[in-house]
Image (cartoon, rainbow, N blue to C red):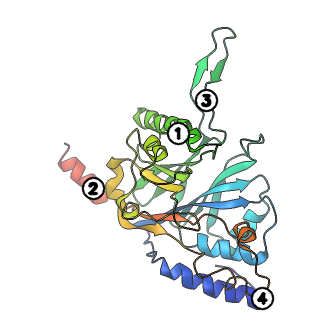
Amino acid sequence: MFHGDLDVDTANGLKELRRRIAKANIPSSKLDETINIATWNIREFGKRPRRKASLHFIAEILNEFDLIAIVELRRNLAELPEVMGILGPYWRVVFSDFTTDEGGNDERFAYLYDKRAVTFTGLAAEADAPRIKNQETGEYETAFSWWRKPFIASFRSGNFDFVAVSAHIRWGKRTSDRIAPLTLLAEWIETRRQDSFGTDKDLILLGDFNITSRRSATYKAITSQGLQMPAALAQSEFGSNLAKDKRYDQILHYPNETSNFTNNGGMLDFYTGGIKKLYPTDTPKKTAFTYELSDHLPLWIQLNVDTETEKLDQILNPK
């Protein structure tokens, strides 16, 4: 980390934040053995200027992980290089273009990663919804839109190649408005997984799906094609909002990837303990605070990326 010269308030805030991070019990990753991946909706990151202290806090949180899917990165990228400068020279980013209409909300997706642990392997694309030919015009048109196209990127760590898919599902006027885009996303991912020319069968879905709980119709929609929650994240009903009562954010995978998911995972709570200890002098109110850090907490999981033994077992036991 390269925090540089800090004022007293920011230094005190960082010490408090580190105490909160330590409570999350995130195990260190090991080169070519494990990586820690996360998904974090950083509220409207880039829409309005943040305090310098907040950029240091965001970098400190991101540094706990090796790969982070960032949701709600906005059109203006000016503060992203500042955060990466604090993280240090080993960090890289792959990001999508922004969508300008009201549904797209000027949002981008990004994958931020530490190149010492994770390698970007070339695929970066937005997911296109299936198209149907209009018999009158001959044009191929989408029958349905995600509003914000999911963003795909391929990575490698250790012996494990995988494709990350991040999404931000619309809020809608009603919870039921989310079911159709979630169902479409589940079907799209399954179609890609079954494609014989697909980049990789190991797909990991991350992002903000505005799902309230595992008992909801929205969760049933996204898992309708076989995606499931890693066991480490399914052990409790903790939420990813500040109140920790809604699991808006998810990390999902297919059962064939189970061996890659360790028993380490959870949520990093930077909020419990109050705002004043992070911003001792000019303390923002709660709503303002969510635009400094976020109204979402990072959700994380540790992956096992040493797959040599598994590959040998597959050779010896093809069934």
Q: Does label 1 or label 2 sit earlier along the sequence? A: 1
Amino acid type at mark 2: Glu
The residue that disc 2 covers is 310
Disc number at residue 179? 1
Q: Are marks 3 and 1 in contact (CB under 8 Å)?
A: no
Q: Residue at x 70, y 56 (%)?
A: 73
Q: CA distance from mark 1 to mark 2?
A: 37 Å
**Residue mark closest to the camera, 3 vs 1:** 1
Tell me which label, 3 or 2, sits earlier in the chain: 3
- Tell me which corner region of the image, top left, top right, bottom left or bottom right, holds residue 272: bottom right
Q: First in sequence, mark 2 or 4: give its number.
A: 4
Q: Quadrant of residue 17?
A: bottom right
List the residue tagged with mark 4.
7
Going from N to C along the chain, the mark reached first, 3 or 4, is 4
The reply to whether discs 1 and 4 touch (Cβ–Cβ < 8 Å) is: no
Q: Residue furthest front?
A: 174
Say what amino acid the circle numbered 4 marks: Asp
